[in-house]
Image (spheres, coloured by chain):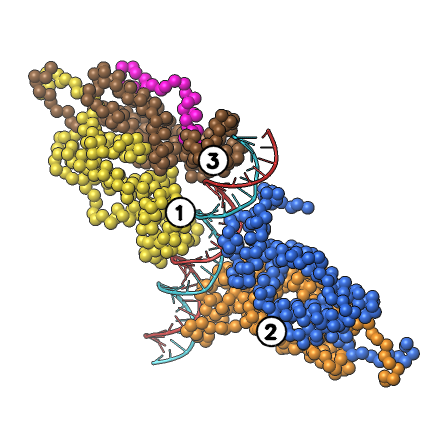
Chain colours: A yellow, B brown, C orange, D blue, E red, F cyan
Amino acid sequence: MTTRRRAAPDATRRSEESRRAILAAAFDLVGQVGYARLSIEGIAARAGVGKQTIYRWWPSKGAVLFDAFLMLSEGETGRPALPDTGDLEADLKAVLRSTVAELNDPRYDEPMRALNTEILHDPALAAAYAERLDGPLKEAKKERLRSAQRAGELRADLDLDVAVEMVWGPLLNRWLQRSGPLTPHYADSIVETALNGLRRPTRRRRDQH
Amino acid sequence: MTTRRRAAPDATRRSEESRRAILAAAFDLVGQVGYARLSIEGIAARAGVGKQTIYRWWPSKGAVLFDAFLMLSEGETGRPALPDTGDLEADLKAVLRSTVAELNDPRYDEPMRALNTEILHDPALAAAYAERLDGPLKEAKKERLRSAQRAGELRADLDLDVAVEMVWGPLLNRWLQRSGPLTPHYADSIVETALNGLRRPTRRRRDQH
Amino acid sequence: MTTRRRAAPDATRRSEESRRAILAAAFDLVGQVGYARLSIEGIAARAGVGKQTIYRWWPSKGAVLFDAFLMLSEGETGRPALPDTGDLEADLKAVLRSTVAELNDPRYDEPMRALNTEILHDPALAAAYAERLDGPLKEAKKERLRSAQRAGELRADLDLDVAVEMVWGPLLNRWLQRSGPLTPHYADSIVETALNGLRRPTRRRRDQH
Amino acid sequence: MTTRRRAAPDATRRSEESRRAILAAAFDLVGQVGYARLSIEGIAARAGVGKQTIYRWWPSKGAVLFDAFLMLSEGETGRPALPDTGDLEADLKAVLRSTVAELNDPRYDEPMRALNTEILHDPALAAAYAERLDGPLKEAKKERLRSAQRAGELRADLDLDVAVEMVWGPLLNRWLQRSGPLTPHYADSIVETALNGLRRPTRRRRDQH
DNA sequence: CATTAAACGAGACGGTACGTCTGGTCTTCTT
DNA sequence: AAGAAGACCAGACGTACCGTCTCGTTTAATG
């Protein structure tokens, strides 16, 4: 379905070169000056492009940024997968530790905060994010959990969406709100707590075996 | 948030009336026009106040908004506490269900998103938030968990900070990123999963008793 | 006005239909939106023509407008001539009165002002105007004066160019600068003043005869 | 009568420094880049002024230019007067010759063409021009003619407005339309022709004395 | 008649300037 | 001295056109 605004630009004539320059400029700039000072004018100037070329193809600053992330993620070949050594706990700890490292890297921190700012206020962008950027990643996470489920490591009746959020939600939240330090130990702690639960294990009845 | 520039304004002469008008205007406006279109000019005009009066007492738009929330929260007397019926699971479910309801209320949704936007980009504001707004609430949450811990409901070796994040992190994250619907059932699901953990319970050894 | 750039376009293939549509659109538009808001894009759109077709055949907006006037004037057959009843004063008054009427007609006023704007700033266009649009008309004016000169009505040593300017200059100037009302009485007044001169007639010496 | 748009700027707070800088910049720029390329942005940049400061006080580019001319003309002390040696013809020739020189000076040519362009299209500006810039000058011209009239040099029944236009109209018109060269000889020719008229003098009857 | 090269409509492109809006500073007058 | 008011410099906003440059698609002269 081709929803069109105004005079529907002709995508077949679109300049691929300009598109890439714009996305690269947007990503670079957001890392340099932060999201608040990121401007369409700045992107256009840095990309060597007319402003109209941005306005013609993107509805908002956030949409440009989103596509910039999309371009990066599409650079990665194939669909993502989490390591599966058979030891779920170790695998999750490894993944969360690397996520922690990434979030502590200022090269990724600022752009990702910028993207999250837009998602926060733009439901359409949030949907696009959920589908195109986070989607494949989340599927990989669920797939890893499903594998562990089949191996009998996880409860059979788990809601995998909730399970994924239980592992990654605390981490992302602490990052977004800066409510605490992001350390490898914290990553481990999340995994252990999520896997074991908060509840004190109760004694099993004797005849259970 | 009375960060000061230059020749420190004399707080004793500060107009309490203007201060309240500004904070009220900020809160009203952010709910009406959204965060992106919230402007200092708009707040000043709505509050019937000169722009300089805002710049004199607050360093940024976010700081005004923060103080607006602070004013609201200080309306609530005493320090907050979670219900404690002795049944942790039921209590948490009740609290999360009411949080879900609040987040679904458009009157709170937009202003709270606005506040989170600022926190996202301003570490100083994030610290202030952690200390003055979220702090007391988080303490209440931890207190409820501590109580359950004392009652033997929770593991003794729990890191309560992580435990709190395990319960509220998924919820806040789903809200911020709009990555799924916020339903009462979802609230319940979080609580159950967090308490029980993801792991399939292993059989206890017989000699445990 | 077929000034050419680059690889001279092949005039034999030129679309007469497009040319007429462009000139008509230009004339219509300048009357509707005024000269300041007349744009090549607007002309092209109104004429149902690509912009390049205009840029291919005309060097400037003014050149298009000039050709539009030229097209109109060439609609009039043969070369123009002023009435010659033998009474110069009456003939000039009649002509100036009709010119006054034309200049007061909003249908002609705006387009002619537009043309004069361009002439004001573009010497090449001024030359083209002098040669192709105003030229024949001026020749007709001079011819009428020459006829009167032959009849002994006018001084033998008159510079006819100056004489023509003496009659039409004041009128055009008042119109361009809106420095006064354009009335039939004004037309008469110009003719009388120009013919008789400003100077008070001196008494002739007796021996002149 | 204080016609106001929007929120009526408070003229008492107006920055005289900015005003002068803007007018000077406008005059300089129009002489350098011509009227077509004169832009509000350019004026603001050259004047070291925010664009809004121009938009706040002037309705159009032409109005700025007009005020720039006005500032210049008000530099001249007192009200203008034409020379009056008692010999009208000589005085007029001197004045027209100096006008011719001025119009041939590129320093004045371009700015004055620019002003005339605006007058051409903006009746309000034309009225302001007639009243404030051209007005005093025209009054001086009429005064000189009136003096000659009193001295018996000119007809008693002359319409002085028409008379003035008869002398200066041809010159201005030839300048605006570039319909011929502006030479000292041309200046003389106009004066002579205007004074003597086009008509061949008729013999006086003998009994006139 | 098919070929073919130019003109054509369409419109994307890098740009410039528009007129508006807001940010943050400074000044003036009032309370 | 603080506050309301608002002018100021600065600069981004989103739009309109500029003049150039492809794109296919007519269309007219030629081989």
The magenta span reads B64-91
At 21% from the left and 48% from the top, the residue drawn is A77
Of helix, strand and loop, which one carries label 2? helix
Task: Say if D168 sits above or below B31 in the image.
Answer: below
Front disc: 2 or 1? 1
Residue C70 seen in the figure: no
Residue to which mark 1 is pinned: A39
Provide residue B156's location: percent of width, then percent of height.
Answer: 19, 20
Residue to which mark 2 is pinned: C130
Label 1 Cα neighbours within 10 Å, binned few <14 / some 14-19 / many ≥20: some
**In which chain is the residue bearing label 2?**
C
The amino acid sitting under disc 1 is Ser
Provide residue C201's location: percent of width, then percent of height.
Answer: 83, 74
Q: Which mark is residue B55?
A: 3
CA distance for labels 1 and 3? 24 Å
The amino acid sitting under disc 2 is Ala
- Horizontal side of E13 relative to B198 (left or right) equals right
The amino acid sitting under disc 3 is Tyr
Q: In which image quadrant can residue C129 be found?
A: bottom right
Q: Is residue B76 magenta?
A: yes
CA distance for labels 2 and 3? 63 Å
- Horizontal side of C78 relative to A124 (left or right) equals right
Which residue reaches farthest front? B7
